Amino acid sequence: LGTWAYVFWRSRFPKIKYSWLLFLGSHDSFSYWVDEKSPVGPDQATAIKRLARISLVKKIMKKWSVTQNLTFKEQLEGGIRYFDLRVSSKPEELGQEIYFIHGLFGIKVWDGLKEINTFLEQHPKEVVFLDFNHFYAMDDSHHFFLISRIRSAFGSKLCSAECVEYVTLQYMWEKKHQVLIFYHYPLYREYAFLWPGYKMPAPWANTTNVHELLQFLETTLEERSRYGTFHVSQAILTPRGRASFKMFDSLYFPFFRNLPMILNWVKAQKPGVRGVNIITSDFVELDDFAATVIALNDLLLEEDETATTS
């Protein structure tokens, strides 16, 4: 879905609550590049760190650490508006630099934030959700450093934490805001522009079975709060334990194999109160996944027209 088409689509929903609209997100959004030469990250168990001393193990780790093929810029151009971000310091590195992480270290967070901001500068009516939901090897000083980087990157584009129901496209345009930051760490209380993590729940199925995944997505949607939060449906399959190291191919193949069933579930959904709000996926460029998700918002227009004429 091209950027121009996305802007046109968004302009049709200026007053609809963001918690009712349907957005597409990427899982481990930054993982299009990980550093095979870096140490294994602190997000991994001690046993895996020991195994990773064998060069072949690191090559396997790289295959299942990569869950996206597109850069931030390419994801944005493809319609992705929610980003799942996991970050860490490098324990053996001096200073407070923070990196993205998924088993292995990715790019510096600062570089990713700048890339996203460049897109927003070029598209002043676009809005993104940045969900910082996992932190590793970080004390308060690291958090202060990261929060300072976030503020430096986006400045006045940052939307202060408000009642979720206030947030519409029109509201964001009037305030000239473009970025909502969700921060799953107590220091969010000290910054007006950090939204608490509990306002962006993202229940995780933690399964390799597509049938279990779809049942879990149904159950958690039924349990979704009617008001006060956004909601993430994670349409992802997760290899467990030893299965990860049996996967000499990347996660691309099991995901691609199950994509038709996942897409069929997506097509049966609708946005709105207790409907789907944000769907995250691996390899978001596959099989028009973005266009399928985004087009479901037309159901809101149809409901509005039906209510108006009845």
Image: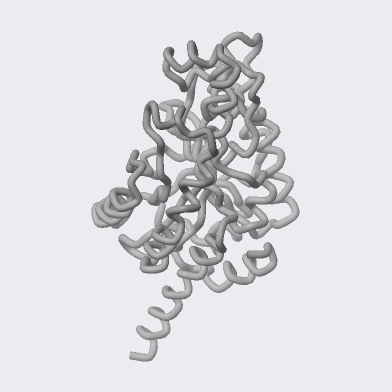
Q: Who's the residue at 60% across and 8% down the image?
A: 92
Q: Who's the residue at 55% across and 73% down the image?
A: 12
Residue 308 is situated, as x and y percent measured from the top left of the image, at 39, 86
**Looking at this rendering, what residue extends furthest in the bottom direction?**
309
Image position of 55 with respect to 250: above or below: above
Q: Is residue 193 visible?
A: no
The answer to which image quadrant residue 122 occupies is: bottom right
Image position of 181 with respect to 218: above or below: above
Residue 35 is situated, as x and y percent measured from the top left of the image, at 65, 25
Q: Who's the residue at 47% across and 44% down the image?
A: 161
Residue 128 is situated, as x and y percent measured from the top left of the image, at 57, 50
Image position of 296 with respect to 283: above or below: below
Image position of 282 with respect to 304: above or below: above
State left or right for residue 308 relative to residue 125: left
Q: How many numbered discs?
A: 0
Residue 204 is situated, as x and y percent measured from the top left of the image, at 35, 41
The quarter in which the C terminus is drawn is bottom left
Q: Nearer the viewer, residue 13 or 252?
A: 252
* Colour style of the rendered protein structure: one colour
Q: Is residue 118 visible?
A: yes
State left or right for residue 209 relative to residue 110: left
State left or right for residue 122 relative to residue 53: right
The quarter in which the N terminus is drawn is bottom right
